[in-house]
Amino acid sequence: MPVYNFGHYLVPQSGSQPPAPFPQGLRTSGPVVPVLIEIPSALADRLQQSGQTIPSPASGLALVDTGASVSAVDAGCIQQLGVQPVGIVTVGTAAGPQQQMLYPGRFSFPGTNLPSIDFSSLLGADLAAQGVDGPRGGPLVALLGRDLLEHFVLVYNGLQGLFTLAY
């Protein structure tokens, strides 16, 4: 079973003390995982067979979002890969119902042993203005929703400032 653990720690000034858990780090950044947004495997295979160039993936961070029923990708990132929408759906947001495009895509998680996952449809969302603060900071390019999390075990240990994803 592939397992990904990430904890936030304070490293003491002197080397004689072990790092201490830093719960505020997890609260600030949230449970985030490095992610590459790629074209779906089937599309990559077709491009390769026809001698075309496979677009370079977009990289950033994916936030584990238990409030999202479906996983989402930054619409700008997936559009830059040349992926065309496959549908439209009305979703409930904090601002009320909104129509958003659906895109096929693939998430891979560099630096982890989590498997790559192809999606027949990901919600296209405007995540461009979102970022992650803290030492693991960077652009937020995806949300890992409950459609993905139903295949994982998620442990959020706020007291220790760490989380675990197991597949």
Image (cartoon, rainbow, N blue to C red):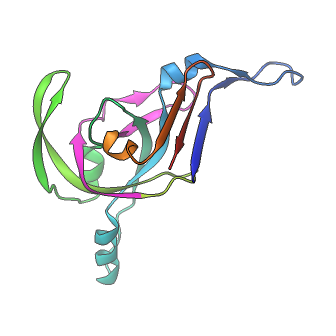
- Residue 127 within the segment the image draws in magenta: yes
Q: Residue at x 57, y 44 (%)?
A: 4
Q: Residue at x 52, y 41 (%)?
A: 165
Q: How many marks?
A: 0
Residue 129 forms part of the magenta stretch: yes
Residue 67, above or below 164: above
- Residue 58 vertical placement versus 16 (above, below): below
The magenta segment is 117-144
The residue shown at (62%, 27%) is 8
Residue that lies at the very extreme toward the right in this rendered image: 16
Would you say the magenta stretch is mainly helix, strand or loop? Answer: strand
Does residue 145 appear left or right of residue 121 in this picture? Answer: right
Q: Position of residue 133 (x, y in %)?
A: 48, 25
The foreground one among 52 and 156 is 156
Task: Tell me where residue 96 sits by quadrant.
Answer: top left
Q: Is residue 85 above or below residue 47?
A: above
At which x and y percent is residue 127?
Answer: 29, 35
Q: Is residue 35 left or right of residue 125?
A: right
Residue 52 lies, with reference to residue 57, above or below; the image says below
Q: Position of residue 112 (x, y in %)?
A: 57, 50
Residue 56, percent across and down? 39, 60
Tell me the quadrant of the picture where the N terminus can be found: bottom right
Judge left or right: residue 47 versus residue 19: left
Residue drawn where x is 32% and y is 83% of the image: 49
- Give the quadrant of residue 73: top left
The residue lying toward the viewer, choosing from 137 and 20, is 20
Q: Quadrant of residue 17?
A: top right
